[in-house]
Image: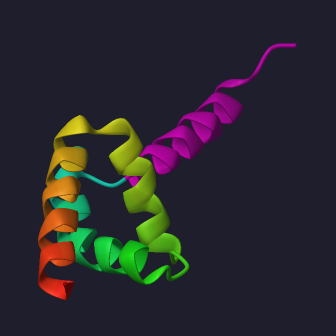
Amino acid sequence: MALNSEQVDRLLTMIGQTQEVELTCPECLDELDKYTQSILDGMPLDEVLERVREHLEACPCCTGQFKLVLETLKAIEK
Ligand SMILES: [Zn+2]
C-alpha cells in the first residue's frame, strides 16, 4: 500500500499538530502552582493540568521544580 503525496502531507500535518499539543517547560512551570494545588486538594485534573502531568513524567527538570513547589505548599498549609 503506497501513500500518495497528498496523504503523506496530511499525515505529516497530523503529526505536527500532535507535537504542538505538548507543553513546553515555561508553559509547564506557568501551570505548576495550580497543578500542585490540585494534587494537594485531591482535585480532578483538567485538560491543561493533565498535560502538565504528562510533561512532568517526561521532564526531570520540571519534576524537580514540582517537588520544590509541593514542599513549599505543604509547609505553608501546615
Ligand atoms: Zn519541562
Q: Position of residue 60 (x, y in %)?
A: 24, 36
Q: Nearer the viewer, residue 46 or 7?
A: 46
Q: Residue at x 51, y 47 (%)?
A: 18
The residues colored magenta run 1-22
Q: List x then y, in percent, for residue 70.
A: 22, 65
Q: Position of residue 72 (x, y in %)?
A: 12, 70
- Left or right of 16? Residue 64 is left
Q: Is 8 covered by the magenta stretch? A: yes
Q: In screen coordinates, is 29 left or right of 11?
A: left
Q: Residue shown at 45%/50% (left/top)?
A: 54
**Nearer the observer, 69 or 4:** 69
Q: Is residue 57 left or right of residue 50?
A: left
Above or below, 32 against 66 in this view is below
Please identify the residue farthest to the top as the structure is shown. 1
In this view, the residue farthest toward the front is 78
**Of 5 and 43, which appears nearest the observer?**
43
In terms of image quadrants, where is residue 53?
bottom left
Q: What predominant SS class does the magenta segment belong to? A: helix
Look at 53% across and 43% down and name the residue there.
13
| Quadrant where the C terminus is found in the figure | bottom left
Is residue 68 found inside the magenta-colored segment of the image?
no
Determine whether 42 is above or below 27 in the image: below
Viewport quadrant of the N terminus? top right
Where residue 45 appears, x then y in whole percent? 51, 75
Q: Considering only vertical position in the picture, is 34 above or below 51?
A: below
Please report the residue visible at 42 percent of the width from the left and 70 percent of the height from the top: 49
